[in-house]
Image (cartoon, grey):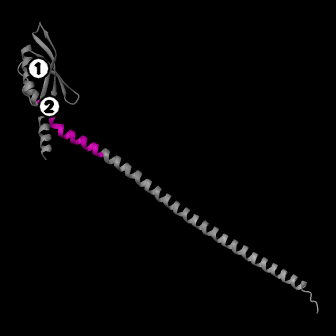
Amino acid sequence: MTRINLLPWRETYRLEKNKEFYVVLGFCVALAAGVGFAGFKYAEDKVNFQAKRNARLNHEIALLQEELQAIKELEETKNDLLARMEIIQELQSSRPQIVHTFHEIAARIPDGIFLTAMKQSGEKKLELDGLAESNARVSALMRRMDRSDYFTNPALEVITSDKNNAISTFKLSLEQNDPNAAKDAESENDI
């Protein structure tokens, strides 16, 4: 029987398998690198896309913040105008009050009383300074003011008599009252 030496064939076969293995290994490494690179690019594109979206959202938010600031300024202007309108309406409604005050004072002063000064302090308090021929005339003035619809709570603060001239000086304080305001409030409540 002849002997055949199979060693070189095995060695060749092993070298071919090693080459095949390295080729497949290189192909797998190349494939893995390609997949990794593609995944990296995909993730990078997603990050860039999200960054663009975030930039756009930030831009839109900045625009909305500017609009909100403009709206706040408009609200402040509106509130200022409403406050001014309210003050004007109060002034318009209280404009005839001074006419009624002077008319009531003129109608309520008895003979023998002369006013030298009239001062309004606060919204409703009125102070009258004057001269009277007697203390009884000051009492009559206080009674008349108490019966008035426009004045309440007359209070005599000071009265002094000059014995040489028989004239008294007095200081009287009253509270102003608007009878029309109570009627207006009742009519608003009825509605």
Q: Going by the image, does 153 lie left or right of 8?
A: left
Q: Residue at x 8, y 18 (%)?
A: 139
Q: Quadrant of residue 126?
A: top left
Magenta-tinted stretch: 81-102
Q: Residue furthest left?
A: 111
Q: CA distance from mark 2 to mark 1?
A: 23 Å
Q: Residue furthest top?
A: 164
- In the figure, 165 relative to 79: above or below? above
Asked whether residue 94 is drawn in magenta, I would say yes
Q: Residue at x 68, y 73 (%)?
A: 34
* Residue type beneath disc 1: Phe
Where is residue 160 shown, x and y percent of the image?
15, 11
Q: Residue furthest front?
A: 1
Looking at the magenta stretch, what is its main secondary structure?
helix
Q: Residue at x 15, y 16 (%)?
A: 170
* Residue type beneath disc 2: Asn
Where is residue 132 shown, x and y percent of the image?
10, 16
> Residue beneath label 1, please?
114
- In the figure, 23 relative to 95: above or below? below
Q: Going by the image, does 86 lie left or right of 188?
A: right
Where is residue 167 shown, x and y percent of the image?
11, 12
Where is residue 176 shown, x and y percent of the image?
15, 29
Callout in the foreground (2, 1)? 2
> Residue beneath label 2, please?
177
